[in-house]
Amino acid sequence: MSGIIRGDRSEALAPYDAGHTPARARVLPSAQVRTGLKRFRMGGQAMADKEQRPGEKIPLAQAFFDNIFLLMVLGIAVPVIFYTIWGLFEIASIPVGK
Amino acid sequence: MSLQPLTGIWWKKVDSSEKVWLGIALVWCLILFAMMPLWHLKGGQNPSFNTFRTTPADFLKKVEAFVEAGPKIAEDKGLPVIAPDPQKEVYMLGRLWQWYPALKLKKGQTYRLHLSSMDLVHGFSLFPLNLNFMVLPGYEYVLTITPTTTGEVFVVCNEFCGIGHHQMVGKITVE
Amino acid sequence: MEAVFRTCAQTGLKVDRQAERLIKVHAVAGVFAILFGGIAAVLVLLTRWPAVHLLDPTSFYRALTFHGINMLIFWIIFFEIAVLYFAGPIVLSCRLAWPRLGWAGFGLMVAGSLLINIAILAGRADVMMTSYAPLQAVSYFYLGWILFAVGALIGVCNFFASLVVARSERTYEGSIPLVTFGAATAGIIAVFTLAHGAIIYIPTWLWSLGIIANIDPGIYRLVWWGLGHASQQINVAAMVSIWYLLATLTVGATPINEKVCRSAFLLYILFINLASAHHLLVDPQLSPAWKIWNTSYGMYLAVLASMIHGMTVPASIEVAQRRKGLTKGLFEWLAKAPWGNPGFAGMALSLVLFGFIGGITGVTFGAEQINIISHNTLRITGHFHATVVAGTTIAFMALTYYVLPLIFRRYVISQKLATLQIYLFATGMIIFIGGMTTAGSYAIPRRYWDVQFATSQFQPPVEAAAFLFLGIMGVGGLFALAGGALYVLLTVGTVLFGRRVPDTPGAVPLAALPQDKGQHVPISGTLVLVFVFLASFIIYYFLNWKWLADIWLVK
């Protein structure tokens, strides 16, 4: 097995580039890292249906998921209401024993 | 992949093989949910909400009145053993580090058992039956129980309550 | 303070050096915590193993308090704050929003953990992790919790503030990566958690100082578990994010459909905290309606989320592997996966053990009525060792083997031992959990010094089989402890003595992304696995209803 932690390069193969798909692949070193902000190299063609065409609007649902602070408000409100406040209400409503 | 930001539109159709699993998992979740109200309707073991506020002093009075009324049929390890009438209310308290009193019940009879604590939070665990409820000071919990097995069943405290926690064992005998 | 960056030669990410330093110190603190918790674990294990029964009662209850807090709170939360510092500023290649505040937060967490540990070791806090009022510890114990919670909250806020920085400084385009979104889920859950910590510990601290007269035990339990269980749900979100991260790093996996994965995280965000109700199902002060709605995470929608991740993570691995040409039969993709890579093995084991053992037992014991035959027995501790230890902790251990070369920039001193560590720990935990959970089904109580009841008022007879399972628990626990000790040795040894990783691309092997030719890749192997999971779930679940029906009638 490739020495993934020790950096054993003995099984290093050429990195993926367009059109080259080895039949049996091992874990490969990530080569051709560019400086700046480009990260892992995505082999082959990009997932075309994900590319936004100019003028195409982001679906509302996607924009909703992008709004982390709205998600935070909901994520705190829902359990505070159902777990904490409802729970405290029930405890407060317990009658005194005869 | 999971470390890259997503440009473009990623809100897209779900593949049918994933949809199948999503659908089945959702159905299973709804079944899980439905089981609980269903068991309240049809099943024999349910936590109820027969709870009253009390104080240790008030509850102690009720327990002592219950023990006083009896009938006390024996003593076991220093504890009075009470064989209550199923028509009457039954009381047991937990305190550091004892369950008081011991009880003698009849199989198939239904009893309203009142539980509370004199001091800390205790765990009412019928051993080895494996029936577990919490006992809190200031709260009187009424459990309506019907023993379905005979023999000796022990009341083990299974909520940590200090150094004598593991010595706190009471007893219920069923015949 | 001007932000200073380095560019990671392995990933191309722009790394804020303050964020990186904070990751390191939080990770180191976490490893100290697991070491302390692990030492206590040995003592607790050897006491609960009746054949050994090592400690006296006082020492046992003290060691158990120490073990619980160091593992469930300090190990886990220090590591999670480290994950947040990674998933925010580093993954988004932006500057850390508040470096100085980040250090203050870390300082508070360390101070808080010291106060708590000193209180316990001094014998002033024999109250278990839960410290249920009216049980009372020395006042600085509660102050320690407050400081720790505030410190952790600062770390969480630093993460969210960094998301704002990344967005406004445009260090990325589009939507944040899935790993960051999962971390944000964990962060949101953490805000709920830590807020409840403040709400419960401030009055409790004042009560311990004599300023407040009483703490209602029913209210304490409700609010405390808003901290206690919710903190474990932070673990779930962090663990799942780490599964996606490790799947990418080890086999080049890409989530098949981000809509599905993120929707599942949304279900966590909205509903997972409701299940703090699990701990209150046989309490007197709450109604069946409240219990049923909350324990079900709102009709089990958060369980649906877990079942989704339990499919999407393996599915993404299967697709990546099939794209590399591993298409033979149903499972060649799995058989030929890098099982010798501790990062992969740990991720896979974490997923399987969390799902099959932790998840199934958790949902089952969390059914309102089934809790009657589980609460406060070893079934509960068996369940949460499956989730927090076999699940979250193994995932954190697996991730460590990437943190070391990428963040500490040292090669792990022995890959073979790292791989052994994961398997040894997992195997030990499986045996331990099996023994413990089964013993619990004999009503053996948790947090209990002597299951032979030698000094109790009455001596209930205990079935011989229960002792057998406790013995199995003991043996499994020893193997797990060996695995845990090896983890500490490897991490400390690497940080101190590991060969430095050179600053050249490819020095740390990270999986390349397989080519996506746009063809449809089946996930048939994954579907078989999830159906096996479902079948196990159904069987175990209904078996428990049957066992419940066998006890006395109660309502």
Image (cartoon, coloured by chain):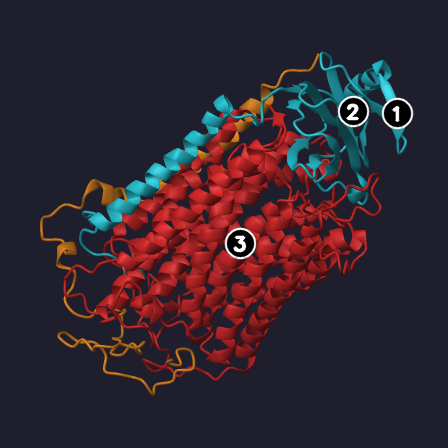
Chain colours: A orange, B cyan, C red
Q: Residues within 10 Å of mark 1 (few under 14, many from 20)?
A: some
Q: Quadrant of the N terminus of chain C?
A: bottom left
Chain letter of mark 3 equals C
From the viewer's side, name the closer residue of A97 and C544: C544
What percent of the width, then of the height, locates residue C118? 72, 56
- Is residue B114 visible from the viewing direction of this image? yes
Identified at 19% across, 48% down, the residue is B12
* Left or right of C209, for residue C357: left
Q: Residues within 10 Å of mark 2 (few under 14, many from 20)?
A: some
Q: Which residue is mark 2?
A: B104
Tell me the distance, in whole angstroms, between the alpha carbons under discs 1 and 3.
Answer: 46 Å
From the viewer's side, name the closer residue of C368 and C466: C466
Whether tag 2 and tag 1 are in contact, CB under 8 A, the answer is yes
Q: Which numbered disc, 3 or 2, marks the residue closer to the eye?
A: 2
Q: Of callouts 2 and 1, which one flags the residue occurring earlier in the amino acid sequence?
A: 1
From the viewer's side, name the closer residue of C497 and B91: B91
* Left or right of B115, for residue C345: left
Q: Indicate which disc residue C386 carries.
A: 3
Tag 2, which secondary structure?
A: strand
What percent of the width, then of the height, locates residue B118? 78, 28
Q: Quadrant of the C terminus of chain C?
A: top right
Tag 3, which secondary structure?
A: helix
* Left or right of C397, for residue C14: left
From the viewer's side, name the closer residue of B71 and C189: B71
The residue under label 1 is which amino acid type? Ala
From this viewpoint, which residue is outermost toward the bottom? A10
The residue under label 2 is which amino acid type? Lys
Whether tag 3 and tag 2 are in contact, CB under 8 A, the answer is no
What percent of the width, then of the height, locates residue C90? 37, 64
Identified at 48% across, 30% down, the residue is C292
Identified at 26% across, 83% down, the residue is A13
Tell me the distance, in whole angstroms, between the alpha carbons under discs 3 and 2.
Answer: 40 Å
